[in-house]
Image: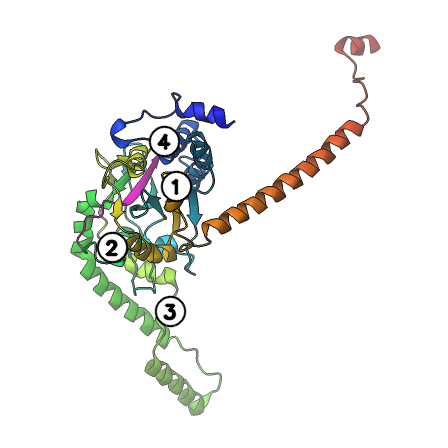
Amino acid sequence: MAEKKAKRLRGPSRPSEHPALGDNALIATFQLAVHDLLVSGNFLGIDEETTTGGLLGAISATAPWCFKANGDQPEYNWVKYKKSGNSPLAEPSTGADFALVLRITQSICRIAIFQAKLQEENGEFSIHQISPAREDGNRIPEPQFVRLQHYARSLLKAAKHKFSATSRLEWAHYLLYKPDTIRALPLSQLSYFSRHYSTHLKASQEDFSIRLKDAISAMQNNIPPSKTDGPEGKEKCDSKRKKKEDVGVDTKKIPSKAKTDLAEIFWNRYKPGTAGTGNGGFNLITLLTAGASGIVSRPPGWLELETETQAKDLIEKLSIDLDIYVGRISSDPSLDPTFAGFLSDSFDNLKQHGKKVSETNISTADAELVNIAAIIKNRPPAPPNTAPTPQSRHSMK
């Protein structure tokens, strides 16, 4: 089977190679996985979560074959690390769905983050939705674009001594799904939306603060009457109210949905309209091919980190909030996708776990298949088909 897969790498189903970008197993993985997913029509156009799962699953399934065909070790060249934070609301908290980390050399890593969206046939997609309040960083409900922009800049800050807060965000993308194509549109090409939200952001914060105070006041005054009649009951009720006013209402007790509804009152008056790609962004095959190139330097659409320390500083924050997928351009041991166990288990632990799982499943399946074969072999033959033919039914009349 590996030989057949190797032939496919040189066959017509793989997008054409470009000498300026070079060629390696990771490039082949990306090109085949995305291309075949689009051609098959599976997963696309259902919803963002299903399509993203299909895309990342296709890459995971394709990687071992491409590395094997390239003469590399097939195991653990594409590894997933689940976010380590406790909150299940990673996407609303950060504005992003997942992150890719590509190991190019022992020191150079490339990083991109993605927020998936379904795209209309005319190329438009909705960019406006309100992300809920987030305790980490004390973020109030705000447009998803603002949340994603802020989160990307916080990652730049985490990569110490390298990037400024005004660096272009060409590595933070909207990943746009259509039945026949997937495009990545970076925030740096959505300057209109950046200006629009920046213009109204301060007013939105003030409006939210006022509405939140009103909501808190309503909660404070919503004290059930005392069950005791007469002056004594009124005195107890007044005492409760005064105590509640002194302490205040914990804003954490106000439901997240209620806070989001308060923010939407303002932003519903200042929706920016839909976005479109036009000629902007990258075909996903293009973006991934350039990112996985070991020849090109600083490809567009990626944040390139020049030391392993910088990568670890940034990934340490990234791993709290997002699922991370790490790929390496070859099975060179220096391109350890676990960063020597920094992200999760070490590479050796992964290999041991994989070997154990493989042996268990193969032995279990072998035993069960032997039993099934024995059952089939010992099963008495089926009785002959005695159903009357049309002619015999006619003769019976």
Sequence-wise first label, 3 or 4: 4
Sequence-wise first label, 1 or 2: 2
| CA separation in Å, label 1 and label 3 | 49 Å
Q: Which mark is residue 332?
A: 1
Would you say the residues marked 3 and 2 are in contact, meaning their CB atoms lie under 8 Å apart?
Answer: no
- Which residue appears at 32% of the width and 69% of the height? 215
User: Residue 25 at x, y = what percent?
Assistant: 38, 34
User: Disc 3 or disc 2, which is closer to the eye?
Assistant: 2
Residue that badge 4 annotates: 31
Residue that badge 2 annotates: 156
Check disc 3 and report its element: helix, strand or loop: helix
Check disc 4 and report its element: helix, strand or loop: helix
Q: Nearer the viewer, residue 18 or 108?
A: 108
From what the image shows, is residue 23 above or below residue 221? above
| CA separation in Å, label 2 and label 4 | 29 Å
- Write down the quadrant of residue 165 in the picture: bottom left
Residue that badge 3 annotates: 252
243 drawn magenta = no
| CA separation in Å, label 1 and label 2 | 28 Å
User: Identity of the amino acid at label 4?
Assistant: Gln
User: Identity of the amino acid at label 3?
Assistant: Lys
Would you say the residues marked 1 and 3 are in contact, meaning their CB atoms lie under 8 Å apart?
Answer: no
| CA separation in Å, label 3 and label 4 | 46 Å
Q: Which residues lie in the magenta part?
A: 166-181
167 drawn magenta = yes
